[in-house]
Amino acid sequence: MTDNLHTRARQLMDEERVEGTLSSENRAWLAAHLRDCDECRAAAAAATAALATLRDTGVELPRGLASRTQMRLRLRAGELRDDRPGTNVAWVVAAISWAAGAATAPWVWRGFAWLGEHAGAPKPIWEIGFVLWWIVPALFATGAVVAERRENPSD
């Protein structure tokens, strides 16, 4: 049982140092435990001293490291954006779709006219159907592109 208390105390101390948050219940329990337990109090003091030493230790960084790192990140982001297979494929598929649509428009028109006559629909109704046949997929594709741009605004 005592080992479980020490284990819980160490886990809570680590959580507080790493994440910086503890619930008020856990914080109160830890404070009470540290008042009563010399072993955990010593461990907490040692960890605090070690972290303070690390924070006080200065590390010399090469001059211009931050700007070089930013430049490399921008270059890599550009490479990833350019290498994305979906971008070029989408343009090719759109071009093929447009060409196929233009090539088949006369047959689709005749098909809508035939359906309209056999269904007894007025001419404006089946003409609107023909227009929607071409517009609705384009609207969906545009919506997909807009949604992707909102998810990846840097593109």
Image (tube, helix red, strand yellow):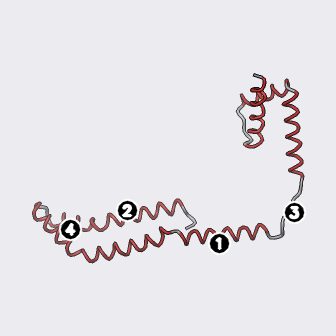
Question: Residue 136, position in %: x, y?
Answer: 32, 63
Depicted 3 relative to depicted 100: above or below: above
Mark-to-mark CA distance, 4 and 3? 74 Å
Question: Residue 40, position in %: x, y?
Answer: 84, 31
In the rendered view, does 106 fall on the left or right side of 84? left
Mark 4 lies on a secondary structure that is helix
Quick one: label 1, few (<14), some, or many (20+) residues within 10 Å?
few
Instruction: Give the residue number, with chain letter if any, for mark 3.
Output: 60
Sequence-first tag of 2 and 3: 3
The three-letter amino acid code for the residue at tag 3 is Glu
Q: Nearer the viewer, residue 113 or 48?
A: 48
Q: Report the residue at 26% width, 68% height from top.
A: 131
Mark-to-mark CA distance, 2 and 3? 54 Å
Mark-to-mark CA distance, 2 and 1? 32 Å
The three-letter amino acid code for the residue at tag 4 is Glu
Q: Quadrant of the N terminus?
A: top right
State which mark lies toward you, 2 or 3: 3
Mark-to-mark CA distance, 2 and 4? 21 Å
Sequence-first tag of 2 and 4: 4
| Residue 127, label in figure | 4
Sequence-first tag of 4 and 1: 1
Quick one: label 2, few (<14), some, or many (20+) residues within 10 Å?
few
State which mark lies toward you, 2 or 1: 1
Give the image quarter of residue 24. top right
Sequence-first tag of 2 and 1: 1
Mark-to-mark CA distance, 3 and 1? 26 Å
Sequence-first tag of 4 and 3: 3
Labels 2 & 3 near each other (Cβ < 8 A): no
Q: Report the residue at 72% width, 39% height from top.
A: 21
Instruction: Give the residue number, with chain letter if any, for mark 1.
Output: 75
Instruction: Give the residue number, with chain letter if any, for mark 2.
Output: 140
